[in-house]
Amino acid sequence: MIVRALTTCGALLLSSGAMAQAATHAGSHNPAIKNSNAAKVAAPAAGANSFSEDQARGRLTKAGYSTVSKLTKDGNGVWRGTAMRAGKKVQVGLDYKGNVTTR
């Protein structure tokens, strides 16, 4: 009887810890990429950018830009190029966090 009670208590303790972990780890585990949506910010964040050129082009396209061209990575790790949006040619940037900037 005591063994069964201890086993039940142990199982309850283990399951409550698993539920607490699931609740605290919601979302992305990579702090550099908040989510798959590109945010629009005033200034890009400088940092080591791990996006490939194709990935950067894809994120800019997903953010609503078309005809993305002339992408190059600058000294701050920001992908820069040109794109079309709402019929206008704009200068775009994509930082290591996935944030989009325009000029």
Image (cartoon, rainbow, N blue to C red):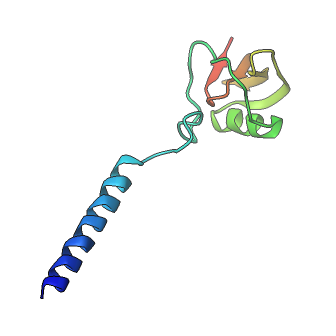
49 or 14: nearer the eye?
Answer: 14
Residue 89 x, y percent position in the rendering = 76, 18
Vertical placement of residue 29 versus 60, above or below: below
55 to the left or right of 62: right
Vertical placement of residue 100 versus 4, above or below: above
Residue 65 at least partly seen: yes
Tally of marks: 0
Residue 31 x, y percent position in the rendering = 54, 35
* Residue at x 67% of width, y 24% of height: 95
Q: Residue furthest front?
A: 2
- Quadrant of the rendered structure where residue 69 is? top right
Residue 88 at least partly seen: no
Residue 37 x, y percent position in the rendering = 56, 38
72 or 87: nearer the eye?
Answer: 72
Image quadrant containing the N terminus: bottom left
* Residue at x 72% of width, y 26% of height: 48
* Residue at x 42% of width, y 48% of height: 25
Residue 91 x, y percent position in the rendering = 75, 16
45 or 60: nearer the eye?
Answer: 45
* Residue at x 58% of width, y 36% of height: 33
21 to the left or right of 3: right
Q: Residue furthest left?
A: 1
Q: Residue furthest bottom?
A: 1
84 to the left or right of 99: right
64 or 3: nearer the eye?
Answer: 3
- Quadrant of the rendered structure where residue 18 is? bottom left
- Quadrant of the rendered structure where residue 97 is? top right
Image quadrant containing the C terminus: top right
